[in-house]
């Protein structure tokens, strides 16, 4: 009887112990997987978020899985890394903006101050007096243009300028803007290739779009070496009018193209004395307000191409 009782007891206990051990192993394995796959990445993400909140934008959280096996947590981590990268860029741009505004204003003021002191010197030649006065005038004009562009951009960004859209011939406007740079072409011995239709009508504020063409043309002249070529091409269909301004100048790398429309950004510092880095920011904002668009194609050492697209009237 005892033997039978122990046999029945064993048949009951052994499966219970076996399945109990299986349950414990599965629980430990599942707990370990949850910790490795979810808890630890979430702890890393929480720690990274705290560092970002305290101003550290150098944070990077690695994804848990390889590309083929990524889940929603990996996607969230990738989005977080992208957000931190963009926040870092914004912080850098903000710092650069303050620094550049200060620098851009200090430079012409220092020039004016220095030449004003030279003008007060005794026994200076008339030629020197004329040269000093001319330098003061140029510095004052640069300072005036800087302040004017800052104010224009501020008004455009805060939508305090509402474009008064009216139909007009953009081909006529392009020709007038190009003629303004005739002396600049000749001075640098540039070849000018123009392909413009007889007429193409857009509906926009003419004075604002003049800022666009003048900035693109002046940049093309500035960044093209003597003997180079500048091409202005205009096409249209029933929906849009396209204007392309190309040059054979120094071109830009990918990083410059990415930031070319940022305020005060100047990819080629060798030409920084010729501008203040606000022109293309103005261009971008004017085109946004005019329901237009601009694209940039550039390669270092091979020139740049700007393509402006506007809705046809």
Image (cartoon, rainbow, N blue to C red):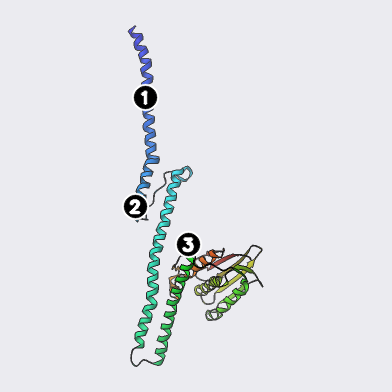
Q: Quadrant of the C terminus?
A: bottom right
What residue do we see at 37% from left, 84% from top?
Answer: 115
- Disc 2 versus disc 3: nearer the observer: 2
The outermost residue toward the top is 1
Left of 209 or right of it: where is 14? left
Whole-Å distance between the Cαs marked 2 and 3? 27 Å
Q: Which mark is residue 20?
A: 1
What residue do we see at 40% from left, 66% from top?
Answer: 97
What residue do we see at 34% from left, 50% from top?
Answer: 50
Whole-Å distance between the Cαs marked 1 and 3? 61 Å
Of residue 78 and residue 278, the one placed in the foreground of this image is 278
Residue 81 at x, y percent in the picture:
42, 52
Whether residue 98 is visible here, answered yes or no, is yes
Could you say which quadrant of the image residue 173 lies in? Answer: bottom right
Q: Which residue is mark 3?
A: 258
Residue 80 at x, y percent in the picture:
42, 50
Residue 154 at x, y percent in the picture:
46, 68
Q: Which mark is residue 51?
A: 2
Whether residue 301 is visible here, answered yes or no, is no
Of residue 127 and residue 168, the one placed in the foreground of this image is 168
Of residue 158 and residue 65, the one placed in the foreground of this image is 158
- Label 2 SS: helix
Residue 159 at x, y percent in the picture:
49, 65
Q: Is residue 165 above or below residue 65?
A: below
- Label 3 SS: helix
Label located before the other in sequence (2 or 3): 2
What residue do we see at 36% from left, 9% from top?
Answer: 4
């Amino acid at each position: 009887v005892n033997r039978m009782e122990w046999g029945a007891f064993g048949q009951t206990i052994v499966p219970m112990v076996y399945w109990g051990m299986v349950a414990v192993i599965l629980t430990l394995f599942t707990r370990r997987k949850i910790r490795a796959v979810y808890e630890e990445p979430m702890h890393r993400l929480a720690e990274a978020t705290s560092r970002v909140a305290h101003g550290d934008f150098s944070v990077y959280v690695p994804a848990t899985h390889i590309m083929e096996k990524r889940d929603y947590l990996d996607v969230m981590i990738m989005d977080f890394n992208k957000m931190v990268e963009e926040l870092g860029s914004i912080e850098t741009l903000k710092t650069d903006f303050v620094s550049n505004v200060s620098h851009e204003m200090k430079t012409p003021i220092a020039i004016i101050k220095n030449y004003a002191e030279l003008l007060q010197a005794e026994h200076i030649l008339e030629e020197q007096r004329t040269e000093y006065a001319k330098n003061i005038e140029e510095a004052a004009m640069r300072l005036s243009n800087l302040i004017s562009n800052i104010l224009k951009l501020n008004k455009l960004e805060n939508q305090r300028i509402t474009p008064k859209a009216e139909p007009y011939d953009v081909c006529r406007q392009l020709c007038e803007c190009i003629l303004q740079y005739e002396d600049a072409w000749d001075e640098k011995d540039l070849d000018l290739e123009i392909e413009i239709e007889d007429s193409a009508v857009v509906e926009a504020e003419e004075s604002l779009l003049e800022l666009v063409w003048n900035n693109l043309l002046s940049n093309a002249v500035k960044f093209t070496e003597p003997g180079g070529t500048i091409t202005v091409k205009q096409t249209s269909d029933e929906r849009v009018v396209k204007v392309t301004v190309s040059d054979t100048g120094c071109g830009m790398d990918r990083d410059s193209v990415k930031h070319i429309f940022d305020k005060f950004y100047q990819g080629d510092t060798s030409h920084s004395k010729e501008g203040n880095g606000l022109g293309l920011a103005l261009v971008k904002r004017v085109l946004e307000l005019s329901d237009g668009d601009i694209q940039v194609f550039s390669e270092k050492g091979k020139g740049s191409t700007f393509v402006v697209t506007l809705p046809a009237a």
